[in-house]
Image (cartoon, helix red, strand yellow):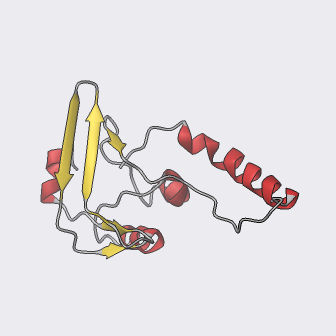
Amino acid sequence: MPRVPADLAGHACLALLTLERDVHDEWLFARPGVREKIRFASKVTAHGDELREAALAGCGIVRLLACHVEGELRSGALVQLLPDWECLGGLPIVAIHRKTKPRLSPINAFVSHLAHAFRRYNDVPKRC
């Protein structure tokens, strides 16, 4: 079990592939007075859902938003690593919709609902 970010070098870390085709194969960790950056050669590079499935299958360590693995963390199927470290540079949660003029009230209501539903994840330190 890794105790500090440098320990991840001895483990298989899996990289996130974004919709823009960016590969997140570098993680930045912080705690008071210390920052550590690790870069790794990923054995698996995939989108979020595929990374979650790979982690569940035992393929390696992933960095995902808490909302994507909440049930798995609660059940114990996945465990949070390095709880004393904050993982910086997480991807934002965004709502994308077609722009119309004027913006329709159902869209406004839905975006407000999403913002409220995901607000609790903004209050949690971003962990790897």
Looking at the image, residue 126 lies above or below residue 96: above
Looking at the image, residue 25 lies above or below residue 90: below
State the residue at coordinates (34%, 61%).
62
- 103 to the left or right of 97: right
What is the tally of numbered marks visible in this picture?
0
Residue projecting furthest to the top? 33
State the residue at coordinates (37%, 47%).
89
Q: Based on the displayed image, in which of its 4 quarters is residue 21 positioned?
A: bottom left
Nearer-the-camera pick, 31 or 111:
111
Q: Can residue 121 be seen in this view?
A: yes
Nearer-the-camera pick, 77 or 36:
36
Residue 116: percent from left, percent from top: 71, 45
Q: Based on the displayed image, in which of its 4 quarters is residue 99 positioned?
A: bottom right
Residue 94: percent from left, percent from top: 58, 56
Looking at the image, residue 57 lies above or below residue 102: below
Residue 57: percent from left, percent from top: 36, 73
- 3 to the left or right of 125: left
